[in-house]
Image (cartoon, helix red, strand yellow):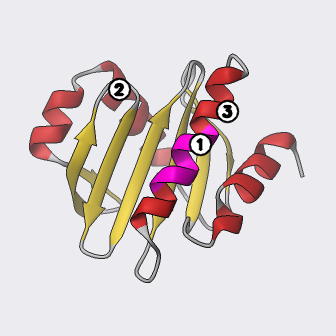
Amino acid sequence: MNQAQTLLLDGLIKTKHVDKAALIRTADMHVMTATSGFNIQTWASVFVQAFFNNPAQIRKEGQYFNDRYYKCYRADSNSIYLKAKEEGVIVAKTGNFILVGTYCQGMYPSVCVEAVEKLADYLRAKGN
């Protein structure tokens, strides 16, 4: 297991309030690592471009992910929070990466947000 996988597992999945997670390199939109069963490569460019285009547009219009519409509750230069019924996607941008975490029914969205944002803060502090 590499360091990125360890960060995702220890910092996110072990909270029991993050269902799936991925780390995407912004330079080339490459998925550095993702949790088992999280097929996010086709969506990597969508999340990277969301930060570099117009977060206000996502906030207004929402975002499709895995063939499902998600309403946007937050979109700024560092974070995007999306929700569809009992599921959600939390996306955070660091200097070099996009961190994606999802939650599903039975999980607390606030814990997912806190875990993703805390790991993003850690990566920012390390210069990543």
Badge 1 crowding class, 10 Å Cα cut-off, few under 14, some 14 to 19, many 20 or more, is: some
Can I make out residue 25 in this image?
Answer: yes
Question: Which quadrant would residue 14 be assigned to in this image?
Answer: bottom right
Picture coordinates of residue 115, whole percent (x, y): 57, 52
**Which residue occupies 54% across, 29% down?**
29
**Which residue occupies 44% across, 83% down?**
106
CB within 8 Å, label 3 to label 1: yes
57 left or right of 50 in image = left
Image quadrant holding the C terminus, namely top right
34 left or right of 115 in image = right
**Which residue occupies 74% across, 58% down?**
9
- Point out the stretch of residues depicted in magenta: 113-119
State the residue in front, 105 or 2: 105
Residue with the mark numbered 1: 118
Dot label at residue 122: 3
Relative vertical location of residue 61 with respect to residue 125 in this rendering, above or below = below
| Majority SS type along the magenta span | helix
Dot label at residue 51: 2
Of marks 1 and 2, which one's residue comes earlier in the chain? 2
Spatial CA distance of label 2 from label 3 is: 19 Å
Relative vertical location of residue 95 with respect to residue 109 in this rendering, above or below = above
Picture coordinates of residue 13, whole percent (x, y): 66, 64
Picture coordinates of residue 63, whole percent (x, y): 23, 48
